[in-house]
Structures are given as structure tokens and as C-alpha cells.
Image (cartoon, grey):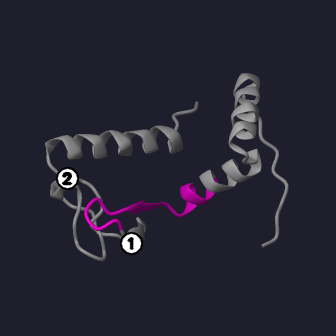
């Protein structure tokens, strides 16, 4: 894989906190950014029922719960109880917050 340099402008406090946390965890900031960009371009999720990892692009979305149906077992968030569905909803909101901004 060919690597290419990328210049980013990020809030100074975030950079400093990220450097410390990345060092604590033994991971490079480049790897963190690369993983986030890979997910942004080609998102994948894990099935709530069977644990199968699958890409969301091309996956069928349940009209009832709005979550992706697993291509392996067909489950979606409908297979969860009320508490599980609530957790799934807020995890989805977390991903939306991370990858979709409303910058002006």
C-alpha cells in the first residue's frame, strides 16, 4: 500500500489530548485518522444477532427500525429487546455525530 502525506488543521487542544492518549495506547495518530477515513469511505457494522461483520453499502435497511439487515442471518435491530434497541439507536447516533458535521 502506498502512503501519502495529508495535512490537517485541527484544534490545538484536541491535537495535544490526542497525542497523549495515542501514546498511552501505543497507537499512532496517523493510524487513528486512517481507520476513521477507511470507515467513512466504506462503513461496516456487526450483526446484533450473529456477530457477522458486513459492509453497510448495498445492505438492505429495515423499514421498521431503520437499521441494516444482516446479509448472513437477516436480523436487524428489530431482533433486540427494548433496551438493546435503545443501545443500538444511541450507538448509531454516536457514529453519526463522529462522521457527519454541519460545518458552515
Asked whether 43 falls inside the magenta stretch, the response is yes
Please state the horizontal and vertical placement of residue 40, each as a whole percent of the image. Answer: 55, 55
Residue wearing tag 2: 65
Q: Does residue 19 appear to the left or right of 81 in the view shown?
A: right
Depth order, front residue of 47/97 = 47
Asked whether 58 falls inside the magenta stretch, the response is no
Depth order, front residue of 24/72 = 24
Q: Does residue 104 appear to the left or right of 88 in the view shown?
A: right
**Quarter of the image that includes the C terminus:** top right
Residue at position x 55%, y 57% from top?
Answer: 39
Residue at position x 21%, y 61% from top?
Answer: 62
Give the secondary structure at mark 2: loop
> Which region is colored magenta?
37-51
Give the secondary structure at mark 1: loop
Residue 58, disc: 1
Label 2–label 1 contact, CB within 8 A:
no
Residue 4 lies in quadrant: bottom right
Q: Does residue 41 appear to the left or right of 14 in the view shown?
A: left
Check the image and report above or below for 6 versus 23: below
Residue 25 lies in quadrant: top right
Residue at position x 53%, y 64% from top?
Answer: 42
Q: What is the CA distance from the residue labelled 2 to the residue labelled 1?
A: 17 Å
Whichever of labels 2 and 1 marks the residue nearer the N terminus, that label is 1
Check the image and report above or below for 68 versus 6: below
Q: Badge 1, how many Cα within 10 Å: few under 14, some, many 20+? A: few
Please state the horizontal and vertical placement of residue 74, each as a whole percent of the image. Answer: 22, 72
Residue 8 lies in quadrant: top right
Please state the horizontal and vertical placement of residue 75, each as a whole percent of the image. Answer: 22, 66
Check the image and report above or below for 45 versus 33: below
Residue at position x 71%, y 53% from top?
Answer: 31
Q: Badge 2, how many Cα within 10 Å: few under 14, some, many 20+? A: some
Q: Identify the residue at the far right of this view.
A: 5
Amino acid at each position: 500500500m502506498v502512503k501519502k502525506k495529508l495535512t490537517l488543521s485541527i484544534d490545538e487542544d484536541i491535537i495535544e489530548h490526542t497525542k497523549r492518549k495515542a501514546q498511552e495506547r501505543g497507537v499512532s495518530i496517523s493510524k487513528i485518522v486512517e481507520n476513521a477515513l477507511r470507515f467513512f469511505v466504506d462503513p461496516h457494522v456487526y450483526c446484533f444477532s450473529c456477530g457477522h461483520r458486513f459492509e453497510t453499502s448495498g445492505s438492505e435497511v429495515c423499514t421498521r427500525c431503520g437499521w441494516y439487515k444482516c446479509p448472513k442471518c437477516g436480523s436487524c435491530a428489530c431482533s433486540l429487546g427494548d433496551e438493546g434497541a435503545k443501545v443500538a439507536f444511541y450507538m448509531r447516533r454516536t457514529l453519526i455525530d463522529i462522521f457527519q458535521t454541519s460545518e458552515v
